[in-house]
Image (cartoon, rainbow, N blue to C red):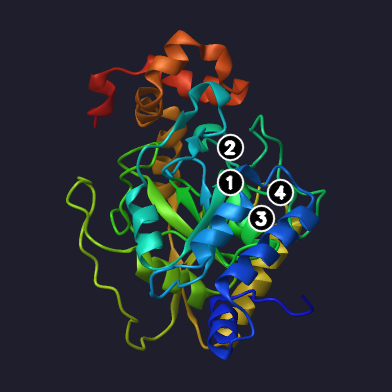
Amino acid sequence: MSTFPLTLADYREAYASGTLTPAAAMREVYRRIVAQADPAIFITLRPEAEVVAEAESLPAGPLHGIPVAVKDNIAVAGLPTTCACPDYATVATEDAAVVTRLRQAGALVIGKTNLDQFATGLVGVRSPYGVPRNALDPALVPGGSSSGSAVAVAAGLVPLALGTDTAGSGRVPAGLNHIVGLKPSLGALSTRGVVPACRTLDCVSVFALTAEDAFAGFSALAGFDAADPFSRAVPVGRPGALPLRVGVPDGPSRRFAGDALSEAAFDAALADLKALGATPVPVDLTPFFATAALLYDGPWVAERWEAIRPLITGNPDALHPVTRAITERATAFSAADAFAG
């Protein structure tokens, strides 16, 4: 096709005008996946004929006929959940709560995307299923842990994808592929049916090409889930116009690890925000840095251990060496450490 939808608005316009049907769109999506020639984006891809047949009888909804990719730590009924660890793989018998909402909104789940094993990492290279190519520059890492979902959107294969975000796993690969990665606040989207990384911190995230599309995806997925102890009702609606205030790291909090290019890019982005009318507000990030260190170097890592305890105790060699090393740090902490002041 000479022109093909990229955003949700593109899909809706094409469907409304009759220039495209959901079934025809799915055929083109699969053609593009083949043309992309990157088998590391998806761990499991549903058969094209199955998805095309499903596209013939979709429910009406805000995501009608929209192809969506789902990170492979989120359950999709009938498909394996691997978390990028073949020895962990099990076929899901029911959808995760967010996948159920996708289907109710009229979306089509086309497959499960690659990730840093057990959602542990920000680089996107810790997977036995390969490394998805960064959509901007194949010489760069795709970012992680939701590497496949970010690349699938950035490459124009799907307009929406689901990931997870505990400490950057949605936002980092989005940034490295120049797309939008929305991390909702804790409990806004149900994590029932998601393999935990750190259950008390995990969030399902949304990838899209535009902020408007990311918000549309979030709106379709949001809703209280009584079966998820962390779920909460969140008003879904566009906020009213407010003055644009942007938190900016103060002097000691400006950390670029000696990377002058990153520092220059940060300052240029800040200048652009000021030109748009934003007011910078200095923020001391020191407490946040200390809290972040607890994720891998404190008692929080015990949540990762508990999520995969049978595997890491019974078959530790099944894990990527870095994933294993990080997770085994949990053995250095006691319950008392978790509650220490």
Q: Nearer the viewer, mark 1 or mark 3?
A: 1
Q: Which mark is residue 151?
A: 3
Helix, strand or loop at mark 3: helix
Q: Which mark is residue 145?
A: none
| 84 left or right, relative to 341 | right
Judging by the rendered image, the residue that carries numbered circle 4 is 258
Q: Is residue 187 above or below residue 29?
A: above
From mark 2 to mark 3, how far is it between C-alphas? Answer: 13 Å
Residue depicted at 55% across the width and 57% down the height: 51
Q: Which mark is residue 116?
A: 2
**Which is nearer the N-term, disc 1 or disc 3?**
1
| 202 left or right, relative to 317 | left
Among the 4 quarters of the image, the one containing residue 321: top right
Relative image position of residue 181 (x, y in whole percent) = 53, 61
Of 305 and 290, nearer the camera is 305
Q: Is residue 190 above or below residue 220?
A: above
**Which is nearer the N-term, disc 3 or disc 4?**
3
Relative image position of residue 263 (x, y in whole percent) = 68, 61
Residue depicted at 60% across the width and 74% down the height: 270
- Quarter placement of the C terminus: top left
Q: Nearer the viewer, mark 1 or mark 4?
A: 1
Q: Name the kind of residue labelled 1 in the image.
A: Thr
**Which is nearer the N-term, disc 2 or disc 4?**
2
Q: Name the kind of residue labelled 3 in the image.
A: Val
Residue depicted at 46% across the width and 16% down the height: 312
